[in-house]
Amino acid sequence: MSKAEFLDVGGNAIAVRRVTGSEPGVVWLGGYRSDMLGTKAETLSEWASANGRAFLRHDYSGHGESGGEFRDGTISTWLAESLAVLRAFTQGPQILVGSSMGAWIALRMAQELRRAGEDERLAGMVLLAPAPDFTAELIEPSLSEEHRRDLERQGYFEEPSEYAPEPNVYTRALIEDGRQNRVMTGPIDTHCPVHVIQGMADPDVPHEHALKLVSLLPADDVTLSLVPDGDHRLSRPQDLDLMVRAVEAVIGQAA
């Protein structure tokens, strides 16, 4: 396993691991409360090492090996960290692989890179169980009166997590900031090939959300793979194989 390096972003030490190799490189963007040592990221790291492909991953602040408090994080914060890591540790075009919330970060990165005149830095995307705009599209519509009271009184609410013993925490700052980072309000111009992989048995992000996202992307550059029995994690051997094949296909399109 590659050794962790650290980059100071906004006063937080952001943990980074990388594999050197050929371009375009692959950049991993994890999900909400996940870290860069998860099964999918590890699979891509091993694939990159075996194939001489550059690979970069990091933990957002408040996640994994990075500094900072999780409850202080917002989409804007994690977006800024991801852009800083990309610019500090990569050169040339990159394939962004975003899982769940990481897909939202990837799409916002595309917008910000284009705004900065750095379109050439984005060669393609693979989006796994994508959850762009999840605060506005998936959380806010389902808030109970108790949730709303907790947000008003204490600035956050908690919900049990299927993936960790500690509950998921959603802050008022995260939700309010999420509204400012929405991408599914109109056509999304990525200017690169995109492959979306979505499980149809996903209890967290309904597959209709992925279909809506695909409808907003330029159709001639988009591939959608629906996995009938796939869940949100998409971490079974067959799911990991599909992910790797998608990354290889996007690299081929970008070449």
Image: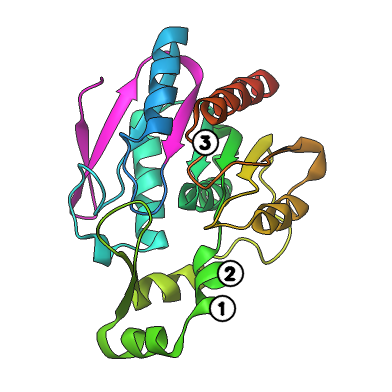
Residue 183 lies, in percent from the top left, at 60, 61
In space, the residues marked 1 and 3 are separated at their CA atoms by: 29 Å
Quadrant in the picture for residue 87? top left
Q: Residues within 10 Å of mark 1 (few under 14, many from 20)?
A: few
Task: Please report the residue visible at 42 percent of the width from the left and 19 percent of the height from the top.
Answer: 54
Q: Residues within 10 Å of mark 3 (few under 14, many from 20)?
A: many
Q: Residues within 10 Å of mark 2 (few under 14, many from 20)?
A: some
What's the colour scheme?
Answer: rainbow
Residue located farthest toward the front when viewing the structure as drawn: 229
Say whether residue 221 is left or right of residue 80.
right
Tell me whether circle 1 and circle 3 mark residues in contact (CB < 8 Å): no
Query: Between tags 2 and 3, which lies in front?
Result: 2
Q: Nearer the viewer, residue 117 or 92?
A: 92
| Quadrant in the picture for the N terminus | top left
Picture disc at residue 137: 2
Residue 236 lies, in percent from the top left, at 49, 31
What residue range appears in magenta?
Answer: 1-29
Picture disc at residue 96: 3
Q: Main secondary structure of the magenta part?
A: strand
Task: Name above or below for residue 222 compared with residue 207.
Answer: above
Task: Name above or below for residue 159 compared with residue 216.
Answer: below
Q: Is residue 149 magenta?
A: no
Tell me whether circle 1 and circle 2 mark residues in contact (CB < 8 Å): yes
SS at badge 3: strand
Q: Nearer the viewer, residue 50 or 25?
A: 50
Mark before the other along the chain sequence, 2 or 3: 3
Residue 55 lies, in percent from the top left, at 41, 24
Residue under label 1: 141
